[in-house]
Image: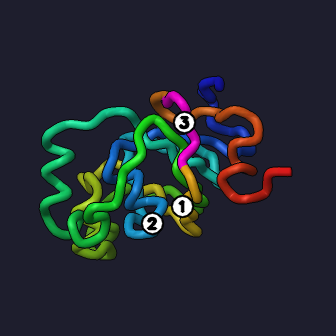
Amino acid sequence: MTFNPDFKRRGPIAISLWQPWAALVVLGHKRIETRHWENQYRGPVIIHAAKRWTRDQAALLRQDPFRKLVGRAPLAFMAYIGTVNLVDILKIDQSTLCAISEQEAAFGNFTPGRFAWILENPQAAVAPIAAAGHQGIWTPAPGVFAQLTGQAA
């Protein structure tokens, strides 16, 4: 796996997310990932569940909407858990804030000036694939996307 500094690669790329947000993305409940940076890439993204797990993250699972949407489902860590398509990136401003649902607002940091990564077509993996993660976006090992989407030969 290699870091992709120019973000102009034609994917698929991977991004590590903390739980329970990683699960919310691949289950289709979180359609916007917020970041402090943008990039030029659009296309398939492999979602990697990071190893980080804190008491604060665990406490979220006892609160709605997290409890209702993730509940007692087992969460994977240090693994590829699914895919999405990154279709757009918007700079967050007042109009963006007016357009998001209350549930979506609970799942991200929508401070004006940050960026909203618009995600579509979530697919949860049948089984997680163990892997170390990285910061930023990065190029996963060859064949991972095919394995996650059932296209492996």
Residue occupying the point 71% across, 49% down: 147
The amino acid type found where label 2 is placed reads: Leu
Q: Amino acid at mark 1?
A: Ala
Q: Specify whether residue 86 is in view.
A: no
- Residue with the mark numbered 1: 124
Question: 46 and 124: which one is in front?
Answer: 124
Identify the residue under disc 2.
27
Question: Is 121 rendered above or below residue 19?
Answer: below
Q: Residue 137: where, in percent of width, then height? A: 54, 36
Q: Is residue 101 left or right of residue 115?
A: left
Q: Which residues are magenta?
A: 128-133
Give the number of the mark in front: 3 or 1. Answer: 3
Pointers 2 and 1 in contact (C-beta within 8 Å): yes
Residue projecting furthest to the top: 2
Q: Which residue is mark 3?
A: 130
Placement of 113 over or under 98, stated as above or below: above
Q: Kindly indicate the quadrant of the structure image that contains residue 149.
A: bottom right
Labelled pair 2, 3 in contact (Cβ < 8 Å): no
Instruction: Provide residue 111's location: percent of width, then percent of height.
Output: 24, 52
Closer to viewer: mark 2 or mark 3? 3
Left or right: residue 143 compared with residue 109: right
The answer to whether the residues at label 3 and label 1 have Cβ atoms under 8 Å apart is no
User: How far is the residue under mark 2 from the one under mark 3?
Assistant: 19 Å
- The reply to whether residue 35 is in sight is yes
Judge whether residue 126 is colored magenta: no
Query: Where's residue 27, x and y in %?
Result: 45, 66
Neighbor class of circle 2 (other Cα within 10 Å; few <14, some 14-19, many 20+) is many
Q: Position of residue 59 (x, y in %)?
A: 13, 50
Gap between marks 2 and 1, in whole Å? 6 Å
